[in-house]
Image (tube, rainbow, N blue to C red):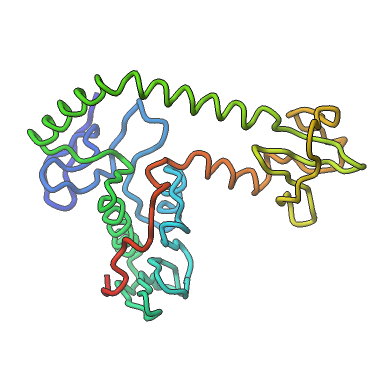
Amino acid sequence: MASTGKCEYCGATLLSTDPVCPQCGAPNPNYSNDNNERKIFHPRTIDELKQYCSERGMPLLKMRFFIGEDFREPKAFGIYQNGSEYVVYKNKADGSRAIRYQGSDEAHAVNELFDKLMEECSNRGIYPDGAPEKGAQVAKQRNLYRRIVMFAAIAGLVVTLGGTAYQMMNHRHDGYYHFDDGIYYHYGDNWYTDTDYGWVESEPVYQGDSSQYYLGEDYSSGWGVSDFKESAAYEEIKSQDSTSSDYDSWDSNDTDWDTDW
């Protein structure tokens, strides 16, 4: 059963099933949806903001958002802690910095950057937690969407099946291989080798049929290497794989980098 509460911004009544306030559109920090695998919340700390972005597969470097980092190059939004203060900044195109907030209130600082992150997403038609509903306008959009789906269903199915087949073919040789007394991991089109710094991408190890060198996908500690699927390289790969296609066309040049915020 849905619980009720008050919007901290306008005081309107909120249900726990409301992703945003129906009156002012502010995010509902207590929103819960049992059908969602990820938690939908309004981050209040730097760590929570990192978690929010990670769960949604946001490519922050591409988006030019630097969370917990005093990034100094042009064209960047960011937040970091400096002693007892939190600094929210924007590095403009000319390299100059505009400070949006500097103070001891972490929740306020995080909210400033979070709002800008949501604004940049919205400007590109991206809504990480779903677009806020707006009555009749949304109903019309839904009806239009249903019509589009009816006409595009067959074509969409073909495209989906084609994409699935491509993924299956592209990853059919994933796993561990043994070449010249070395253990390598193959993922997609890339080869990886274990070093003192962890698994890193290597030059192609073998061209042609390498099935005779295939060890399998399951890791064995007897090989003298670390588990590839526990490595930072694998985490980065999976993060990129899970990134919504909504972000694929993100162009940081679409941001107005000449204003203070």
At 35% from the left and 23% from the top, the residue drawn is 155
Horizontal side, residue 5 vs residue 61: left or right: left
Q: Residue 258: x percent and y percent?
A: 29, 74
At 42% from the left and 21% from the top, the residue drawn is 158
Horizontal side, residue 139 vs residue 165: left or right: left
Please state which of residues 110 and 261 is positioned toward the viewer in this rendering.
261
**In the figure, residue 114 lies in which quadrant?**
bottom left
Q: Residue 110: x percent and y percent?
A: 34, 60
Q: Residue 69: x percent and y percent?
A: 48, 67
Q: Residue 101: x percent and y percent?
A: 31, 72
Quarter of the C terminus within the rendering: bottom left
**Marker count (numbered):** 0
Quarter of the N terminus within the rendering: top left
Horizontal side, residue 171 vs residue 35: left or right: right
Please state which of residues 57 and 257 is positioned toward the viewer in this rendering.
257
At 66% from the left and 40% from the top, the residue drawn is 189
Q: Residue furthest toward the right?
A: 181
**In the figure, residue 176 lies in which quadrant?**
top right
Position of residue 79 relative to residue 120, above or below, is below
Please state which of residues 166 and 236 is positioned toward the viewer in this rendering.
166
At 38% from the left and 74% from the top, the residue drawn is 91
Position of residue 119 relative to residue 99, above or below, is above
